[in-house]
Amino acid sequence: MRDHEERSVIVDSVYHLLDFEGHTSFPEALREAAVHNNYQIVLMTGEFNTILTVETRHLVKIEDAVQIVRSGAAFNSEDIVMVPIGGIVSYWGYITITNQRYVLLIVDNDDQFEMDEMRQLARVIELAIGMWKYTPERDARAEFIKSAIRGDLAFCRSLLEEADMSDMHFVSAFLAEEVEPAEVAGLLEKYRQEYDFMTLTDAGESNIYGMIYTEDTNSRSSVKNACLAMYNELKGWSKDSRFFHITGIDTIDDVIDGFRLINRTWQYTEIVFPYKRVFSKYEMSVVCDCVYMRSGSTPLQSMYLSLLEPFEREVSKNKGKLLLDTLATFVLDAGMNSNRTAEFMDIHNNTVQYRLKKANEILGADMTANRVIPGLTMALAIKRLEEK
């Protein structure tokens, strides 16, 4: 009896999927097969953007299913795997269409099929796609975020309506480096459920770009605060992970400007701020100016570095370097807190206080004064880049 049932679902699906005379298109044939056999199908791009849906029951939102799968790293192989979602049995895996990889989701409405059947069904659907010469629609949302990341504002604007992003208010753009994208997706899902925002991401092997947005104008402030809380939570992650975010924005122009700033500075930011893991637009703006000066504005760079020249002239080279290292840690890393400076440098606070006093004397100014700290910050940041 079981053998007959197994043959039935596969044979019946093949019958409908390959009925070229009875159907005018592959999506129509797929719908007929799904309805007759009581399953649902969703075809998605590698970025999990939906391009074809055959729903025979409305039991769970596709967006919610995607977030659960991504956050749990539910599948990462070429095989089909089972993922229970809210009491619903679903099967996920990759198929290939015209040399590109797509995600196939099959929902077993009444938990009536076995794993082997779903694997066979996935292969049958993949073969039928080839025989129909079916070409998936363009993934406008994937192209939208990719064009934003590379700074193509004109193309982004042309995709706003097609990607269904015209009425969205953007709140944050980010890059996570040296991470498991699935772990970042899990954190995004945690905050998304609580604060009801939306995300669009583009994941690589060890990094993930993303944008966070909402269609509710009144929720922008709460979503912004949620983003800041989420990024703060990232500080406790792996010491190798780094997170760059531009938060408190609104338009697609802001998003693209944010990605431009991230892309210009992420490789240098850690050099200037080695003790930080999460970087905001404030740290990146400082680094961006430093990189600009190093690449073409030599007189301006020399002007800033001249602020530190007394440490080489008035004391010995070794002592000058020791004082500058302490000063840089105090200003750039420790938020001008001597106790934190002592922790970072693994020395006693009294030693820090002594060195800062000597540095103050050499500078001939109060290093913490509002009129002094901006120039001093830039000088110390440029020096760190120069020494790398």
Image (cartoon, rainbow, N blue to C red):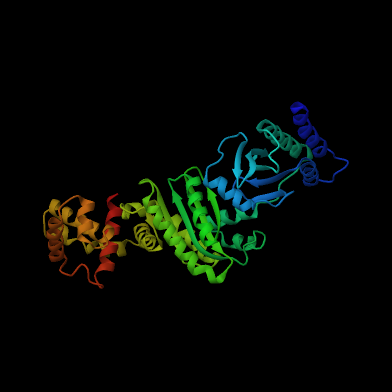
Closer-to-camera residue (115/179): 115
Compared across the picture, whether 237 is left or right of 310 comes to right
- Compared across the picture, whether 227 is left or right of 383 comes to right
Residue 283 lies left or right of residue 85; in this view the side is: left
Q: Residue at 72% x, 35% y: name it.
A: 121
Q: Residue at x 28, y 59 (%)?
A: 332
Q: Is residue 54 left or right of residue 352?
A: right
User: Which residue is rendered at x = 29% and y = 58% of the image?
Assistant: 381
- Residue 291, located in which quarter of the rendered image? bottom left
For residue 112, above or below residue 269: above
Q: Is residue 152 visible?
A: yes
Place residue 293 in its image quadrant. bottom left
- Residue at screen point 80% across, 44% down: 32
- Residue 247 placed where, x, y %? 45, 63
State which quarter of the image contains the N terminus: top right
Q: Is residue 361 above or below residue 89?
A: below
Q: Position of residue 144 (x, y in %)?
A: 60, 56
Q: Find residue 340 and report its horizontal and vertical position in percent.
A: 23, 57
From the viewer's side, name the closer residue of 226 and 205. 226
- Closer to us: 4 or 34: 4
Query: What is the number of callouts on the image?
Result: 0
Farthest-out residue, right: 21
Residue 363 placed where, x, y %? 17, 66
Q: Is residue 98 visible?
A: no
